[in-house]
Image (cartoon, rainbow, N blue to C red):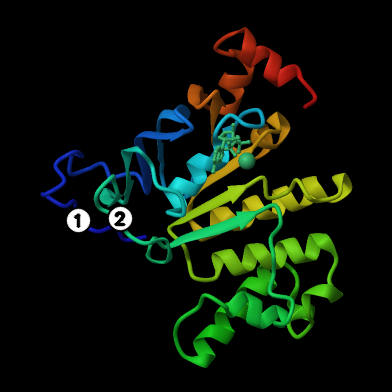
Amino acid sequence: MTSSPPDPMLGTNSASAPAPRLEIRNLRRFFDGRAVVDDVSLQIQAGQVTCLLGPSGCGKSTTLRMIAGVEMQDSGEIYVDGKLICDTVFRVPPERREIGLMFQDFALFPHLSVADNVAFGLKGSKDEKRARVEELLRKVSLSQYIDEFPHQLSGGEQQRVALARALAPKPRIMLMDEPFSGLDNRLRDGIRDETLTLLKEEDAAVLLVTHEPEEAMRMADEIALMRSGKIVQQGAPYNVYTRPADRAAVGFFSDTN
Ligand code: ADP
Ligand code: MG
């Protein structure tokens, strides 16, 4: 991996420490006068998975949508590789943020083949696109379905196509909002592990939103525990699990949700 030289205009990082791939600073978003995201800050390095973990309604999806650029923050800034991409006056549009998205309803295009779904966001020559599509379908073990259509695939297989599609353009950042919650329990662990392997190979900074402690424990390099719009604790999964910040954190980990 080569990294670009530090930008002297930024001035926030020493020459030896690369800027985080994704940094959000003091993000806030109000709905009806209530701060649903309240002063949230995070840093994620390339190749790292951070899980934003918290109960339903605590502001996880709103945080993700602001990073994706489909929701505007009321205050705070977002940086990618040390460059400002969004504050309250300046805004790089969503399609130019080099972000891959994956949601619970992964919504493949039903009228496009698996190959065309994966190629959808790709630029370049036909041969280049085809090579990237084949590479990704090999990685998610779906090469044999390249010319099939989504309805011919199982839920788990469609999920893996959606992952391939999101990663195909080599996003700098992957945002995943409860991506496995629509899946059968039997499939979930296997797909989590496969997804993690692929994410690590592709070297994006990953922010994965979940309300399931087990999922965060399994997938995260770092857990950010969120409650009522705030990050109340952040650290390695083992540390967050064994040393919860307060009684509510203990309760959240012991709940079955
Ligand atoms: P989570 O993803 O953690 O379940 P959300 O970010 O979806 O939480 O929502 C956080 C809070 O913000 C919830 O109380 C939700 O009802 C509220 N909210 C989300 N989007 C809107 C909106 N567009 N208008 C008003 N309230 C909203
Ligand atoms: Mg949500």
The residue type indicated by label 1 comes to Pro
The quarter of the picture where residue 55 lies is top right
Q: Position of residue 68 (x, y in %)?
A: 46, 53
Q: Is residue 27 above or below residue 248?
A: below
Q: Nearer the viewer, residue 52 or 105?
A: 105
Q: Secondary structure at mark 2?
A: loop
Q: In percent of the image, x 16 and y 52: which residue is there?
A: 7
Q: Is residue 88 above or below residue 40?
A: below
Disc 2, disc 1: CB below 8 Å? no
Specify the farthest residue to the top: 247
Residue under pointer 1: 5
Q: Nearer the viewer, residue 119 or 16?
A: 119
Specify the farthest residue to the front: 32
The quarter of the picture where residue 43 lies is top left
Q: In percent of the image, x 61 and y 69: which residue is there?
A: 165
Residue at mark 2 to residue at mark 1: CA–CA distance: 24 Å
Tell me which numbered mark, 2 or 1, is placed earlier along the sequence. Answer: 1
Q: Position of residue 184 (x, y in %)?
A: 86, 49
Q: Is residue 116 left or right of residue 98?
A: right
Q: Residue 91, which numbered label?
A: 2
The residue type indicated by label 2 comes to Arg
Count of numbered tags? 2
Q: Residues within 10 Å of mark 1 (few under 14, many from 20)?
A: few
Specify the farthest residue to the bottom: 126
Q: Is residue 191 left or right of residue 127?
A: right
Q: Is residue 151 left or right of residue 226?
A: right
Q: Can the viewer see residue 51 in this picture?
A: no
